[in-house]
Amino acid sequence: MTNETREIRLKRLRMRAGHRGIKEMDLILGGWAERHLATADDATLDAFETVMAEADQDLYQWVSGQAEPPGSLRPFLERLRAEFMAGR
């Protein structure tokens, strides 16, 4: 969204992250958003937004280690997975 301010983008991402459709991903992505969105740079926001475009079932398998993530998503998902596993 080219005319979107950073503030609006953060609000939109935070809302989408916490209202995914399956509770596990609400908690994982919503929790990450609450902890990191305010300080994330544009590249991290882009990566987060790209990850959020994926299906919840795939994301959960990648984050939980049940399946290998695609190469393009791997750097962000490894970061997300590390936090998820540390919080278990």
Image (tube, rainbow, N blue to C red):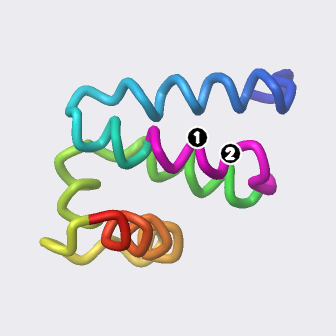
The magenta stretch spans residue 11: no
Locate residue 7 relative to residue 62 in the image: left or right: right
Amino acid type indicated by mark 1? Glu
Residue 59 point in image, percent of width and height: 28, 54
- Disc 2 and disc 1: Cα gap in Å? 6 Å
Asked which secondary structure carries label 2, the reply is: helix
Name the main secondary structure of what is drawn in magenta.
Answer: helix
The residue that mark 1 highlights is: 34
Callout 2–callout 1 Cβ contact below 8 Å: yes
Which span is picked out in magenta?
Answer: 30-42
Residue 6 point in image, percent of width and height: 84, 32
10 Å neighbourhood of mark 2: few (<14), some, or many (≥20)? Answer: many
Residue 10 point in image, percent of width and height: 70, 32
Is 15 above or below relative to 70?
Answer: above
The residue that mark 2 highlights is: 37
Amino acid type indicated by mark 2? Leu
Q: Name the front one of labels 2 and 1.
A: 1
Farthest left residue? 66
Residue at figure coordinates x 22%, y 33% from the top left: 23
Residue at figure coordinates x 41%, y 75% from the top left: 82
Is 30 above or below relative to 11?
Answer: below
Locate residue 79 relative to residue 63 in the image: left or right: right
10 Å neighbourhood of mark 1: few (<14), some, or many (≥20)? Answer: few
